[in-house]
Amino acid sequence: MSSRSLGTRTTLAAALAIVLALAIVGIVVDVLVGRQLHRSLDRSLRDRAVEVAQLNASAPVLLTSPGALDAPLAGRQLDVEVVDRRRRIVARSLALGGRALPVERSLADVISTGVGRYANAALGSDHVRVYVAPLADVRGPAAGGAVAVAASTEDLSDTLEKLRVFLLLATLAAAGTAALALAILMRRALSPLGRLARSAAEIERTGDARRRLPEPDGDDEVGRLARTLNAMLASLERAREAERRFLADASHELRTPLTALLGNVSYLARHGASEELVAELEEDARRLARLADDLLVLSAEEAAAAPDEVVRLDELAARVGETAANVDVTAPAPVRALGDRAALERAVTNLVQNAQRHGPGGPIGIEVAAANGVATLSVSDAGPGLAPDEAEQAFERFWRKGGGEGGSGLGLAIVRATAERHGGRAYARGSRFTIELPALRDFSDSSATKDRESPKGSS
């Protein structure tokens, strides 16, 4: 992996993109300008040839006059050579001296076809562009011959070369300027990220989740990132604090039965066994076992994945009602939800046991219903239930009404963890404890679980 920073890579990429873009523009400009210059030169050659042809038709005697063919056209000095139909030179510009334009084949073709044509040739060390045009077969020494007009392409090549150099320098200057500007902007833009990285590294080194990252003043992406990370740190701090409280509460809950168990064992060692002592030892052992089991269940429930099994809540409630005494189940219609059957059954059983333990006796009701895409599974007894402030704390770990003994204090916490894993919630109102889950309106709503439908579940 490259060790270059994000700013350096971005600056280099931007500079390269600018160079490529300007190179493409330069190539297009060079082609267009070159084509325009060549067309302009060709027009100048053709216009000069037309003038000579007109002079040959109107005043052929003037063709042989010294200097008659040396007048420049549009500021460009042109070489002119006039030949007769046998390709003998009749007149030529003084600039040619004793030289002849090397276009014998073009002259022969033009005289024979009567159609003008362009050609490239070398006149000494110069490269020239030549236009050869036929002359009218009227009077005069050049009648039926041709005129050749030539111009050096050196100026054109120099112009294009200077244009290319200019475009190259402009490309490099633009790329350098853009890279410098982008480097400055990237440095200013990335400096908050650098501070965030250093602060995050310091938090990682110290392991102190109470520290926070510096938040930039602006409301840009970096500012939102810093606030999001700080919210995550706050959530981690709350989770760590909850874990510390859980460990402290679990240690406290375990200490009480362990202390009683050790005291009874010590008494047993000194005085021997009695029926009452053995019963107390058995109760202490059972309490420790229940507490350990509930701790394991709660830990597994909080770490488990989201369920994907289709569960008939009405059938589940009926099965719990069959295993418990004095329980009435009300489920007028099938209610389906995605869930973990065993976990949901354990949660309902916990609510029933809670009602049996803390209720006034008498029948316990289980009611299953669904409305507006929400499935509810409620357990209630005939007692007054919890006060509003107690209902808010009832699902906390190790909470007991009035701080009394009995149970592990984790039954309702397991119910809440199960409901939340299923995407729902658990709450209490008076003596009515409810698990609320997202309901499946129809079995076909979950195509991923359609193959799991049983004949009983489709009734």
Image: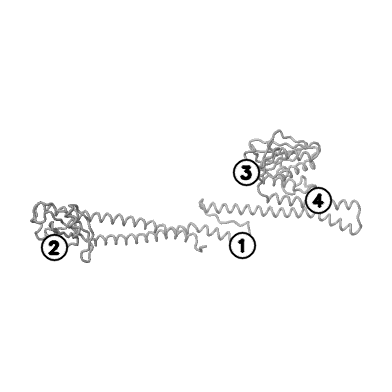
Q: Earlier in the sequence, mark 2 or mark 3?
A: 2
- In the image, residue 287 sits, relative to residue 7, either above or below, namely above
Q: How many C-alpha atoms fall within 10 Å of the one at disc 3: few (<14), some, or many (≥20)? A: few
Q: How many C-alpha atoms fall within 10 Å of the one at disc 1: few (<14), some, or many (≥20)? A: few
To which residue does mark 1 refer? 205
Disc number for residue 157 = none
Q: Looking at the picture, how far across and down is residue 353, in whole percent?
A: 78, 43
Helix, strand or loop at label 2? It is: helix
To which residue does mark 4 refer? 287
- The residue at the point 43 percent across, 58 percent down is 14
Helix, strand or loop at label 4? It is: helix
Tell me the mark number nearer the camera, choosing from 1 and 4: 4
Q: Amino acid at mark 4?
A: Arg
Decide: marks 4, 2 in contact (CB < 8 A)? no
Q: Earlier in the sequence, mark 3 or mark 1?
A: 1
Q: Amino acid at mark 2?
A: Leu
- Horizontal placement of 328 versus 72: left or right? right
Tell me the mark number nearer the camera, choosing from 4 and 3: 3
Q: How is the image coloured?
A: one colour
- The residue at the point 59 percent across, 53 percent down is 230
Q: Earlier in the sequence, mark 4 or mark 3?
A: 4
To which residue does mark 3 refer? 448
State the CA–CA distance, disc 2 to disc 3. 96 Å
Q: How many C-alpha atoms fall within 10 Å of the one at disc 4: few (<14), some, or many (≥20)? A: some
The answer to which of 240 and 311 lies nearer the viewer is 311
- Horizontal placement of 35 versus 402: left or right? left
Q: How many C-alpha atoms fall within 10 Å of the one at disc 2: few (<14), some, or many (≥20)? A: some
Q: Quadrant of residue 336?
A: top right
State the CA–CA distance, disc 4 to disc 3. 42 Å
Q: Looking at the picture, how far across and down is residue 39, in whole percent?
A: 25, 54
To which residue does mark 2 refer? 94
